[in-house]
Amino acid sequence: MRIAPFASPADGQLNMTVVHDLSRLKFLFIFITVFFRKHHKFKEVSRFTGKRMSIVTPYTLPVHADGELIGVTPTDVHICMNCWKLLQTIDEHKNTSLRLFQNNNFNLTKKL
């Protein structure tokens, strides 16, 4: 399932998908279309891209990123280029590893 099917981890852009103004029945219908990457065609689904975004609502709402709760509104998010890498396989002397996370101060790998 890809909520943001046009997102690229290498383009330096945030991708935000907002679903708005729907009944519960239409929400269920649109949710099913996520599996076929067709949900972005509905007028109730808006997509935004940028390097920095502010999320402001009339009342406090939860904010999710990649399915994880990251805070509540209002909040600001931004891109930090070259700060971390995800899911990179490593073949050092034929020892196969999977790099799960890396930034300037931390490196997490798992032997396969």
Image: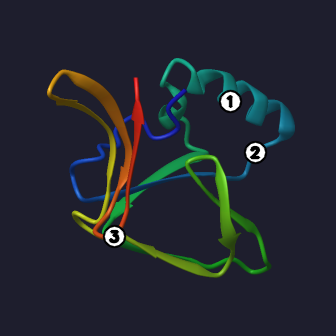
Query: How does the figure colour the protein chain or chains?
Result: rainbow
Residue type at mark 1 is Phe
Question: Is 80 in front, or is 58?
Answer: 80
Q: Residues within 10 Å of mark 2 (few under 14, many from 20)?
A: few
Identity of the residue drawn at 72% across and 25% down: 29
- Identify which amino acid the numbered label 2 is placed on: Leu
| Secondary structure under the numbered disc 2 in the rendered image | loop
Query: Which is more foreground, mark 3 or mark 2?
Result: 3
Disc 2 to disc 1: CB gap under 8 Å: no
Q: Residue at x 54, y 31 (%)?
A: 39
Question: Which residue in the structure is indicated by mark 2?
Answer: 22
| Placement of the N terminus among the 4 image quadrants | top right
User: Around disc 1, counting alpha carbons within 10 Å, would you say few (fewer than 14), some (14 to 19), or many (20 or more)?
Assistant: some
How far across and how far down the image is residue 97, in percent?
A: 32, 30
Question: In the rendered image of this protein, does residue 94 appear above or below residue 23?
Answer: above
Q: Which mark is residue 105?
A: 3
Marks 3 and 1 close (CB-CB < 8 Å): no
Q: Secondary structure at mark 1?
A: helix
Eyeballing the image, is 84 above or below 53? Answer: above
Q: Residue furthest left?
A: 93
Q: Is residue 100 above or below residue 91?
A: below
Question: Distance from label 3 to label 2 (Cα)?
Answer: 44 Å
